Each structure stands twice: as C-alpha cells, then as structure tokens.
C-alpha cells in the first residue's frame, strides 16, 4: 500500500468511525476504536463489523434494490402512520399465529431431482378459465389507501403489469368497478356479509355486474378477533382518527353502518334502500346455498377453511373453491400454520375444486411447498402491502416479480417443468 493510499484509507476509516450511522447502528465503541487503530487484523475485523452494521441500518431507496420481499417491510414501516401499520401488522392475542404460519414452511424440506431439462419451464396456472403466469394470487386486504394514497388502484395497475389475479376486499378503499377498469380484466370480489341480507345480495350482484369472476366469502371472523397490536398502534398514533373514520371502521356484521361512516369504503355504499331482511344469526352452510341458488352465477368460494370436515361439506354444498386461510393470523390464535392445514383440506376436496392457500407466503420455496401439497394457488397479503407502502405500484410490481423469480428458480432446481409436475414426491417432512 502506498503512503497516499494508506493515508486516504486512514482518513476514510476515521470518517467511518465518526459516522452517526454507525453509532445509531449500535456498534460497540471498541470496534469504532479498532477502525483507526494500527493493528491491521483488528482494523479488518472492525471494518467487517462496520459494514454489517451499516447494511443492517440501511433501507432500500428504490424498489429495484430489493433482494427479497422482506426488504420492503422496514421502508413501508417508515412511511406508514403507526396506527395503519399496526392494523396491517396485527395478529390476534400475542400475534403467535403469524409466526406459526411462517414456521410451518420450515417443517418441510425439498427433494430436488437432477438431470431434467429445465431450460424451459412454465409456471402458469388457469383459474376459472383465466390464465396467469404464476400461481401467486393477490389476496384481499382492506383499506389500502391507509398504506399509500393510490391504495388498491396501484395494486390493480401492478396486477395488470405482471398479469396477476387480484382479489378485492369488501372493505377496500376503491370500488370493484374502478378495480376491474384499472386491472383491465376480471378480479375476484371478497365478501363480508352484512347483517341485512337485502344489502349483501345487492353487493354480490353489483360485483357480478362489474365483471368479477368469483365471490370469495370470508367465514373466519364471525366471532370477532382480539387484535391487541392494532389497538396499541392506534393508541400510539397522535393523529385524530375520527377525521377519517367518522364512526369507526366497518366490521363484518356491524349494525347500522351509514354512508357517512363508510365514505372511504365505496363497496359498502350506493345501494337501493330495499326493505331490510335481517340475518337471524351468523352465517351457516345454508348461507352458501342462498348465494349459489338465488344471488349469483359467479363462482362461489369460501375463505377461511382449515379442516377436512369443512372441506368435505364445502364440496357437498357445491362450493367452487376454497381459501385455506387463517386470515394471516388475524382470526383466532390457533397456532396452526395454513401450510399444516393444507394436506387435510386437500384430502377433503380430492382435486374436485380449486384450492388457494394463504398465510405467511414470502418465498418461492413457500409457494412450491403449497403446490406440492396440492394447492392450485398461493395467496399473499402483507408482502404486497409492504411493497405498496414502500414505493406504491412500483413496489407491488417488484414484490410480484421477486416472488415469481424465486418460484421459477426453485421449479428449475427441483426439476419440475410445469405446475402439474409438482407433487408430494418433491417434499418431505423435515427431520
Ligand atoms: C391488513 C390486512 C387486511 C386484511 N383484510 C382482509 C379482508 O378485508 N378480507 C379478507 O378476506 N381477508 C383479509 N385479510 C387476510 C388476507 O386476505 C390473507 O388471508 C392474509 O393476509 C394472508 O397472510 P399474509 O399476510 O401472511 O400473507 C387481511 C389481511 C391483512 C394483513
């Protein structure tokens, strides 16, 4: 090393040692001292520590810098108000089912086959007559303008750019008509029933008229859920919630929701004032019969099924598809991963109806495991909300692109050239 190089290196290390970023990253003061010390070995070790600390502390500044979907989470957290963040991040009780969903994937190992020609693979799936390039579905998430001013519209544009299926929530901040226009193709409409059947019926028929291909009836919140993280986040937020939420957010089965309360929930407003037909209790399988027989010709799916018994009942009732879902750990704190529930649901459906599995999907390997266990598709919730909160449409597009890239990579590594080729032989319980 020349004198000049050594001097500029010392200067640089001195600058690094004084950097507030390193202090903020919590780097030990001995490490800071070693950076400018004369012991080459200790300086090198300190530099490695400093680099690690700076990487940990840094956030991506562009969607294109993301290496995986997790890179969007801290950026979105920085951008999104604390109450809205907590609404997204919350599970129930102590949030343990969110963790369980992720851990479920670790209980399966992959069994790659070698020497298969994987120069060309096809990851596409066909769902109710529509072809998509991957099995990754954009799941319904309510109130997306809480995360970015363009909310569900940005997601619809990303879905169009990457050709993904989008499922719109009843409590979306964008109407089903606007979503289908922005997507430039069909979407699915997720249904939270209303306590007035006359209103529920109008909502479903409106979605059908708008061009939705399926109604996804969510059944996992009928007893309510205890979302403590959400409440703590709302308490920590200093803004005045009632500026936006006049009478509180509408929840499934809420009584007497007025248009004023719902001015940010366009799928819940603008209906005829038909004579009310109050529900006598929370929905049962009879509700599905009513939907299928008297309301809609759309495909009727049920979201929130996690047992073989319910899967068998659904098939017997003529349900067209299921979402194996625990609402992303936001329903009951079951501690049971959806990927663990999937095999018994598949045992109940036996390939007769479409099955989407969601909950904790963050990696291409997660999607592969669900396909191997018999799902037709894998739904994502929070990852694309992280992308949305971080960089709007561009962030959502990058989340979809990264998951697709990872999934196609694992398909190739496993020697599976198309979705039909992926089955139980490619995974095994982890020992
Ligand atoms: C903030 C948030 C809002 C959600 N809103 C709805 C909704 O309106 N309707 C619904 O059926 N599911 C809703 N879900 C559940 C998702 O559709 C999906 O089941 C879940 O997010 C998947 O788990 P993941 O977030 O770990 O990917 C919501 C999830 C989150 C995180």
Image (cartoon, rainbow, N blue to C red):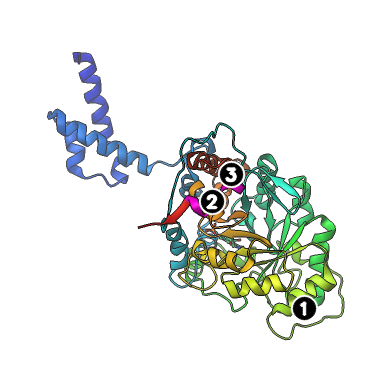
Residue 406: say if magenta.
no
Q: Earlier in the sequence, mark 1 or mark 2?
A: 1
Q: Earlier in the sequence, mark 2 or mark 3?
A: 2
Q: How far apart are marks 1 and 3 (CA)?
A: 37 Å
Q: How far apart are marks 2 and 3 (CA)?
A: 12 Å
Relative vertical location of residue 102 with respect to residue 161 in this rendering, above or below: below
Name the spot of residue 186 as percent of width and height, x first. 77, 51
The residue that mark 3 highlights is 400
The residue that mark 1 highlights is 196
Question: Looking at the magenta stretch, what is its main secondary structure?
Answer: helix
Marks 2/3 in contact by CB < 8 Å: the verdict is no
Q: Can residue 19 be seen in this view?
A: no
SS for callout 1: loop
Q: Which residue is drawn at 52% across and 64% down?
A: 338
Relative vertical location of residue 328 with respect to residue 45 in this rendering, above or below: below
Q: Earlier in the sequence, mark 1 or mark 3?
A: 1
SS for callout 3: helix
Residue that extends furthest to the left in the rendered view of this protein: 39
């Amino acid at each position: 090393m020349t004198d000049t190089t050594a001097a500029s290196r010392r200067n640089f290390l001195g600058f690094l040692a004084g950097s507030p970023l390193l202090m903020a990253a919590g780097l030990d003061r001995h490490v800071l001292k070693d950076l400018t010390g004369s012991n080459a070995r200790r300086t090198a070790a300190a530099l490695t520590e400093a680099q690690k600390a700076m990487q940990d502390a840094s956030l991506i500044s562009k969607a294109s810098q993301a290496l995986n979907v997790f890179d969007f989470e801290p950026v979105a957290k920085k951008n999104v108000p604390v109450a809205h963040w907590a609404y997204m991040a919350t599970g129930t009780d102590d949030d343990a089912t969110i963790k369980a969903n992720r851990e479920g994937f670790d209980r399966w190992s992959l069994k790659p086959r070698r020497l298969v020609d994987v120069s060309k693979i096809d990851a596409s799936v066909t769902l109710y007559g529509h072809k998509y390039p991957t099995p990754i579905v954009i799941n319904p998430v309510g109130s997306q303008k809480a995360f970015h001013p363009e909310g569900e519209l940005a997601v619809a544009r990303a879905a169009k750019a990457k050709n993904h299926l989008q499922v719109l929530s009843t409590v979306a901040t964008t109407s089903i008509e606007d979503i289908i226009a922005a997507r430039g193709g069909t979407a699915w409409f997720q249904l939270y029933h209303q306590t007035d059947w006359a209103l529920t019926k109008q909502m479903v028929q409106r979605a059908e008229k708008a061009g939705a291909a399926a109604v996804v009836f969510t059944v996992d919140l009928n007893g309510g859920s205890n979302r403590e993280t959400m409440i703590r986040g709302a308490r920590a937020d200093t803004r005045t919630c009632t500026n936006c939420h006049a009478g509180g957010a509408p929840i499934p089965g809420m009584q007497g929701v007025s248009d004023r309360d719902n001015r940010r929930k366009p799928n819940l407003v603008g209906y005829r004032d038909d004579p009310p037909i109050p529900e006598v209790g929370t929905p049962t399988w009879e509700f599905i019969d009513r939907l299928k027989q008297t309301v809609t010709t759309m495909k009727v799916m049920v979201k929130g099924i996690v047992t073989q018994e319910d899967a068998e009942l659904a098939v017997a009732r003529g349900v067209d598809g299921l979402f194996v879902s625990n609402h992303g750990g936001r329903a009951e704190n079951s501690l049971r991963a959806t990927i663990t529930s999937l095999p018994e649901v598949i045992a109940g459906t036996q390939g007769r109806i479409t099955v989407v599995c969601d909950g904790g999907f963050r990696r291409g390997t997660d999607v592969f495991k669900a396909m191997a266990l018999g799902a037709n598709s894998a739904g994502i919730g929070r990852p694309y909300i992280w992308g949305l909160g971080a960089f709007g449409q561009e962030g959502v597009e990058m989340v979809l692109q990264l998951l697709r890239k990872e999934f196609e990579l694992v398909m190739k590594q496993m020697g599976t050239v198309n979705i039909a080729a992926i089955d139980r032989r490619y995974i095994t319980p982890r020992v």
